Image (tube, rainbow, N blue to C red):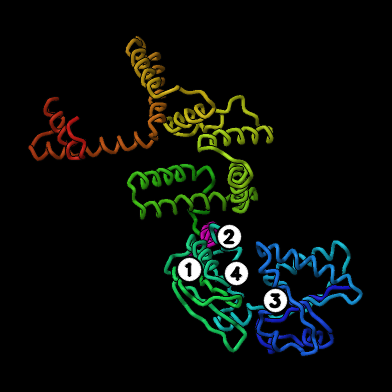
Amino acid sequence: MAITILGLGPGGPAYLTREAWDLLCEADEIYLRTRHHPIVAALPTHLVLHSFDELYQQADDVAEVYETIAQRIIALGQRPQGVVYAVPGHPWVGESSVQRIVARARQIGLPVRLVEGLSFIEPTLAVLEVDALNGLQVADASDLAAAHHPPLDPDRPALIGQLDSQQLASDVKLTLMNAYPDEHPVTLVRAAGTPQCTRMTIPLYELDQGQPLDHLTCLYVPPLPHPGGLPALQETVARLRAPDGCPWDREQSHQTLRSNLLEETYEVLAALDADDPERLCEELGDLLMQIAMHVQIATEEGTFRFADVIGRIDAKLKRRHPHVFGGQTVQDSAEVLRNWEAIKADERVAEGHAPQSRLEGVPSALPALARAQAISDRAARLGFDWSDVEGVLDKVVEEVRELRACEDAAAREREMGDLLFTLVNLARWLGVDAESALRRACDRFTQRFAQMEQEARLQHSDFASLAPAEQEVLWQKAKAQQGEGSA
């Protein structure tokens, strides 16, 4: 009783190993995962051939096919004569059924012999004239098609196997386009290791536009023409921090970089306010560099690495989105936010950091206006809120009345704070981000004031010397130039 798993190589008899050929000559029968392979016609004529091709038409998905094959091979392997199971290429390259068979055989103590074979990778590299040791990544087309973002480093070449249909090519294209430009050149290689081998280089966006595809087709994706992966940024920052790197970068610590992190964050906000995609792209890069610098410092100190940062946020996102990554269902975004708060509270309890209030999680280092909105949002999600916007407006009027009644500085400060906090709540009810609204108001005021000063200079006047009525005229003119009329 035993199982022999044999690799048939990628193409004709020339790629079959001597060990594999000797075994085939000695065997009486073999079980092929599929007959659709170039070498089948050249196998020894005395062999009785069985295949599992019919399963591909009967099963709902490929995983079910591989599971059924594994079950049958395990059963056949327990016969006195055992079984020889033959797969295209190398048994450990793109053969899910082999993984299942080996795992099951180990569980029951059934011996497995592996006869290696040349995979599709080597002849494909010969066609492409690519060295695999230059960072080649290998992926399965079906796995890639099921993803939303390719699990690939775009700075390294990638070889995608078993691209066997137009639908699969369409799904792979969409996934790759999340990391590569539409025009990125890719190469289709078909039937590598056979005289019928062909190659075709096309832009990525044409991948599913009528190209000939079958089970012998693979896709080569070259690196981006410029650094585009996170490892490249990590290498650059690590180089800056190295003993022979930049003296300024080597002197920095988590604390000295605090102001830089804050500044770059506000630069990103400014790009968002300007609705400038090019500037946003640049500013996000500057912000990411700050993150990479902090991670590199932590790496040098031995506290954590980038993998820890990414691993934690990835796990947190999945944990806090059970309606996406679990079986939970939600009615709307409001329910999502309520669940989010409940999950966060449970996390704190599990970590032994149960707060006295759920509002404690709002960072105190936030700018006051942004902190007020975060507190307001969270309190509302917990059910502490007005029933309608009219209630908020009434509260604004109440706070103004109380402010007017104040007779000392301390009371005025307190009531002014209450008024500002109520206005933040009003902004939330109106669907407005208070921090952004005030920042834009500051920008508008600055622009209007500069226009008034310019207008005063054209009239050979000093703005500060103008009468209030004259200043009001210039103010209304500046507003009109901004498209806001005279209101």
Placement of 368 over or under 111, stated as above or below? above
- The crowding category of the residue bearing disc 1, from other C-alpha atoms within 10 Å (few below 14, some 14 to 19, many at least 20), is some
The disc placed on residue 326 is none
Q: Which of the two labelled residues, at mark 1 and mark 2, occupies the earlier sequence position?
A: 2
Amino acid bearing label 2: Ala
Q: Which of the two labelled residues, at mark 3 and mark 2, occupies the earlier sequence position?
A: 3
The disc placed on residue 224 is 1
**Residue at point 60% right, 69% down?**
137
Marks 2 and 4, how far apart in space?
18 Å
**Residue 232 among those drawn in magenta:** yes
Marks 3 and 2, how far apart in space?
24 Å
Marks 1 and 2, how far apart in space?
23 Å
Q: How many marks?
A: 4
- Indicate which label's residue lies in the foreground, 2 or 4: 2
Judged from the image, the secondary structure of the residue bearing numbered disc 2 is helix
Marks 1 and 4, how far apart in space?
14 Å
The disc placed on residue 146 is 2
Q: In the rendered view, does 466 fall on the left or right side of 330?
A: left
Placement of 43 over or under 393, stated as above or below? below
- Indicate which label's residue lies in the foreground, 3 or 2: 3
The residue beneath circle 3 is 34
